[in-house]
Amino acid sequence: MGRLIYSAIASLDGYVNDAQGRFEWAAPDEELHAFVNDLERPVGTQLYGRRMYETMRFWETQGDGPDEPPVMHDFARLWRAADKVVYSANLDAVDTSRTRLERSFDPEAVTRMKAEASRDLTVGGPTLAAAAFRSGLVDECHLFLHPVSVGGGTPALPRDQRVDLELLHERRFASSGVIHARYRVRR
């Protein structure tokens, strides 16, 4: 059985982007990127909302350039190897390999995916993650807290529900000031 893991890069005040939708402050340095790559290795399936998919589809064709660092090559390979499910009522189609489009989030279907999975699943994007939290499907939460306060934007965690978390591990990245906190979702 696979676990469903939500990972979010967030500002210290809890947003994945600012009020204008910008997130340039979230770009990882090489040390942080390598750590994220290691977290992605056991993942077999990635669940995305439309906006997160549109951001991540960059990795379908990028990351392999001769001037790009090895951590980008590694992440691109990991991203392309994973199965992807995109939940969107607005997209006409998806154009990346190993990707299928679902019109709506179905908690029962995700429960079956978890039960049948031999590898972990991730949920990407705070809106889709909120639906997964509401359905009781998220097993772990990984927050990457960046040393910036953006004052508003899209919240990393659901604002309309309580989520009790148990800290499993934390790590500080000295070069960037980012803190990674890994939590188990308490039922």
Image (tube, rainbow, N blue to C red):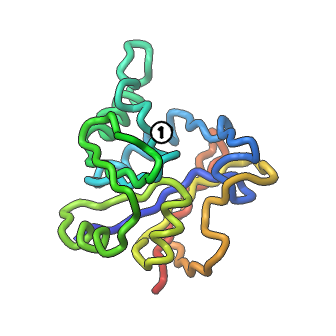
Query: Looking at the figure, which quarter contains the N terminus?
Result: bottom left
Residue at 51% x, 33% y: name it.
30
Specify whether 155 is left or right of 4. right
Any part of residue 182 in sight? yes
Any part of residue 35 in sight? no
Under mark 1, the amino acid is Glu
Specify whether 60 is left or right of 49. left
Is 52 drawn above or below residue 184 in the view shown?
Answer: above
User: Mark 1 — residue?
Assistant: 54
Specify whether 154 is left or right of 76. right
Is 96 drawn above or below residue 110 in the view shown?
Answer: above
- Badge count: 1
Query: How far from the left and from the top, in percent, is residue 180?
Result: 56, 56
Query: How far from the left and from the top, in percent, is residue 115?
Result: 22, 73
153, 139: nearer the viewer: 153
Query: How far from the left and from the top, in percent, is residue 15?
Result: 68, 55
List the single residue furthest toward the bottom. Answer: 187
Residue at 51% x, 54% y: name it.
125
Residue at 33% x, 34% y: name it.
95
List the single residue furthest toward the top. Answer: 66
174, 24: nearer the viewer: 24
Mark 1 neighbour density, 10 Å: few (under 14) some (14–19) many (20 or more): few
128, 90: nearer the viewer: 90
